[in-house]
Amino acid sequence: MLDSALDLLRSFTNPERLIALLTTVLSGWLGYAVLIGIVFAETGLLVGFFLPGDSLLFTVGVVAGAGQLNIVLINIVLMAAAIIGDGVGFHLGRHTGPAIFNRPDSRFFKQEYLHRTQAFYDKHGGKTIIYARFVPIIRTFAPFVAGVAGMNYGRFLMFNVFGGIGWVFLLTMLGYFLGEWAPVRAHFEKVILGIIFVSVLPVLLEFWKAHRRA
């Protein structure tokens, strides 16, 4: 069961397999709905950190470039999903923060991720909401931590809108314009790994700086 779920998730980061899904079981509005659900869950639900984010958006851009998705429509709906997802995470943090911070670890929740995001937020303040869009795991927990910290909602919303629009637009358009480039298609998995590496680079740098200070 778990292997089947993981295999399905991998389909969303492979252009050929995603195209196959969108033209068969996920054709029409259902395909858009599933993509919206993944982006929303990764940004709005604390258990969504394992879902593909950056790699999914890049792959969606590649698929749109192949004519299987409307690039304008997919940008609009995924931007909305990202912004609404962060908003849900913020209000979840504001209303249930203490209980979540005291929650024990489970397969789908790690206190380590929450405390790592708290340290990131303490350092960067409100700009964390924008920075976090490009950092896996931190992206999932940042709006929640902002809610726990009592950040002004108007200020949060401004960062949320700018971050959500910039994140979705940058990665989908990269996929849209680079997807048909032969070297990218020939080494797509390596390109995806490169995107993931660039995404986690800020976290790696923070760990390195903390290690040097220690």
Image (tube, rainbow, N blue to C red):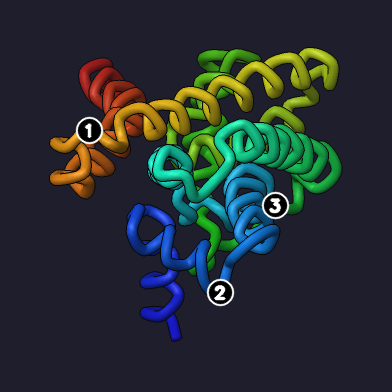
Amino acid identity at mark 2: Val
In x, y percent, where is residue 124? 54, 14
For label 1, the SS is loop
* Left or right relative to 55: residue 131: right
The earlier-in-sequence mark between 2 and 3 is 2
x 56%, y 31%: residue: 118
The earlier-in-sequence mark between 1 and 3 is 3
Marks 2/3: CA distance?
36 Å
Dot 2, crowdedness within 10 Å: few (<14), some or many (≥20)?
few
x 75%, y 52%: residue: 99
x 52%, y 33%: residue: 117
Dot 1, crowdedness within 10 Å: few (<14), some or many (≥20)?
few
For label 3, the SS is helix
User: Which one is in front, 209 or 163?
Assistant: 163
Marks 1/3: CA distance?
45 Å
Amino acid identity at mark 1: Trp
* Left or right relative to 8: residue 43: right
x 70%, y 52%: residue: 100
Q: Quadrant of the N terminus?
A: bottom left
Q: Do the residues labelled 1 and 2 touch (CB within 8 Å)?
A: no
In the rendered image, which residue does mark 2 sit on? 25
* Left or right relative to 123: residue 12: left
In the rendered image, which residue does mark 3 sit on? 100
Q: Quadrant of the C terminus?
A: top left
In x, y percent, where is residue 150? 80, 25
Image position of 174 with respect to 182: above or below: above
In the rendered image, which residue does mark 1 sit on? 181
Q: Are marks 2 and 3 in contact (CB under 8 Å)?
A: no
